[in-house]
Every structure is written in C-alpha cells, then in structure tokens.
Amino acid sequence: MFNFFKKKEENNNEKAQNGGFGLLKNALSKTANSLIDSVVNVVTNDSIPDEFELEDIETMLIKADLGVDLATELVEKIKEKRIKSSQLREFLKQEFIEILNLEKDNKLKFDKDKINVYFVVGVNGAGKTTLIGKLAHRFKIQGERVLLVAGDTFRAAAEEQLDVWSKRAGVDILREDKADSASLAYRSIDMARQNGYNVVIIDSAGRLQNKFNLIEELKKIKNVIYKKIENDNLETLLVLDGSQGQNGLNQALVFNEAVDISALAITKLDGTPKGGIIFSIAKNLKLPTKLIGIGEGINDVVDFNKDDFINALFE
Ligand SMILES: Nc1nc2c(ncn2[C@@H]2O[C@H](COP(=O)(O)OP(=O)(O)OP(=O)(O)O)[C@@H](O)[C@H]2O)c(=O)[nH]1
Ligand SMILES: [Mg+2]
C-alpha cells in the first residue's frame, strides 16, 4: 500500500518536472533560435568561418542579448580554435555551461522551521507583483503558511493587484491604506511570529523617476527586516525583465549597491529572443539567478537550474 502511494508520488513528481521542462523548452524556443540556430546557420558548408561570417556571428550573438564583450570573446575563441561550422553548436554549449558555472548557490533560500522573508525589488513593470503571486501559490501548495505584504504603498492599484494575487493563491495579505512601507514590513514580521507564518513576501515600489527616494525607502525596509530576523532567512530578490536585455545589468548594480541583492529572478523569458541575457548576467554580475518567469500565469515560474536551462536551449 505504502509503496503504491510512494510510486504514485514519484510519478507525479516526474510528471511535474517533465511538464516544467516542457514549459521551459517552449518558453526558450525563440532564444534557442536567435542564440544558437541563427549562429550555426551563418556558415552553410562545413568550413571554418571567414572574417565576414565571424562578423555575422558576432552580430547574431549581440542580437540575442549576450552583450558586446561576451559576443566578442566568443568570436575570438571561434577564430583562435578554428572551430568549424559543424562544431559550432557543441562549442557554444560548452562555453555556455562554463559561463553558468560562474554562478553559485542557485537555490532559493528556504528553511521550513524559520520565518523566511523574501524582499522583492525591481523597476516598474519588471514583474515583481506577478512573481510574488506565483511564489505564494508555490509555497502554499507546498503546505507553507504564507503572508504577502503590500509594500508598494506608492500607488493604490499596486495593493489591489497584490490583493488579487493573494486571493488567487489562497494566502493572507497585510495591506493598509497610506501606510509607510517600512513600518508595514516591521509589523509583518511580528505578525508572522504571532500567527505562525513561515513565508513572508514583501512587495515594493518600482518607480525609478524618483530614484533617490525609492532607494532610501528600500534601504529603510531592509534595515527593518534585518533588525527582526537573522540574515540567513532573508532573500533580497531583484526582479529583472529578461526581454529588456542589457538594461538589467545597470539596474542590478544600482539595486545591489542600495540593498545588497542575494538573488535574481529573470522574468518574461517566454516569447523573447533575448534570453542570452542570462549568460551576460552570469558573466558580469556576481549574483545568482534563482528563478525565471516564463509567462503571466500562476504556475509560470521555474527554479533556475543550469542543466535544465542548457538542455532546454540545446535539446
Ligand atoms: N510574458 C510574461 N509576462 C510577465 C511575466 N511576469 C510578469 N509579466 C507581465 O508583466 C507586467 C508587469 O508585471 P507586474 O508584476 O505588475 O510588475 P511590477 O514589477 O510589479 O510593476 P510595478 O508594480 O509597476 O512596479 C504584467 O502585465 C505581467 O502580467 C513573465 O514571466 N512573462
Ligand atoms: Mg507591482
């Protein structure tokens, strides 16, 4: 009897993983096209690319948002190692694996027995609130007790939007009209202690028009959380819009300086040919990508797993 259930559970897990991989592969199909197929197709016969073809390869890589430096570096290697067109695919795969290996600890922090706080930051429209909804749903079906905090007190619609997600995910929310976001964050941790929530996800405003105030506010929230919990249980999660490509790198520097980012979530990787940004991020930022967003639905978030990502691009 027990074995039967165990077997069933294993099958379900497998199915979920395969389903997840299928979704990822589908979401990355345009990136696979721009980053691999179009590059490999530059040279039609099986030869070593000439100067013009190398230039075309570089252009393709930049278009896929790999960034100029990385694209140039790869083209130099292709030239130096005299990589033939039939070897290009495997060459790219090995290079991309090496780049992703620069990242460490890609697993989202979580300790079942503690209060886990996820402080979610990023510019307007990056996908913060949506990601919070997806995470809330995921933690909820894992059986965790989740509290969302409407820390984007800048615009009323933001609280409303988070409220909709909290209902969709079936989790609780702490929101208050015209509240000060740092004081809301402070109270949310007390509330978690008193009521046994083990996951607290804090939304924040994304306005960059008033950068100074935003950064000061984010620092304040972070300090408040620090005072309340051990650092180990805090994930400061920067959300970057993957379809915006290289802009994300600069945003990461600004946010990292302000609040010390511990994890990245790259959203909107579905339907964009610009997913090469993942490699640019791994190469240029010393920050681990932990989550990726592949759609607007509640299930459209996957843990960033290096092997899966490479396989979804190359298989
Ligand atoms: N295709 C796609 N769309 C996404 C994804 N994540 C978010 N979006 C969409 O992006 C838009 C902005 O998302 P929000 O979650 O509101 O972004 P935000 O960072 O909270 O924005 P502000 O509250 O204005 O700072 C919405 O229309 C989302 O549906 C994703 O992974 N894929
Ligand atoms: Mg929002």
Image (cartoon, rainbow, N blue to C red):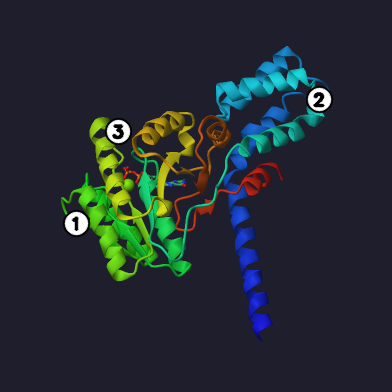
Residue found 55% across the figure and 29% down from its top: 65
* Residue marked by disc 3: 208
Q: Earlier in the sequence, mark 3 or mark 1?
A: 1
Tag 3's secondary structure? Answer: loop
Q: CA distance from mark 1 to mark 2?
A: 62 Å
Question: Residue 35 location in percent, x, y?
Answer: 63, 33
Can you tell which of label 2 and label 3 is closer to the viewer? 3
Q: Residue at x 49, y 32 (%)?
A: 245
Q: Which residue is at the far right?
A: 46
Q: Quadrant of the C terminus?
A: top right
Residue 5 left/right relative to 186: right
Query: For the residue marked with disc 1, what is the amino acid?
Result: Glu
Q: Which residue has dot 2 on it?
A: 84
Looking at this rendering, what residue extends furthest in the top direction? 51
Pinpoint residue 44: horizontal percent, then vertical percent: 78, 25
Q: Residue furthest left?
A: 178
Amino acid type assigned to the residue bearing label 2 in the image: Lys
Q: Secondary structure at mark 1?
A: loop
- Pick whichever, 197 or 305, lies toward us: 197
Write the residue at 36% across / 55% down.
201
Q: Quadrant of residue 252?
A: top left
Give the position of the N terminus as an image quadrant.
Answer: bottom right
| Mark 1, residue position | 176
Query: Exactly how many numbered labels are in the figure?
Result: 3
Q: Nearer the viewer, residue 9 or 187?
A: 187
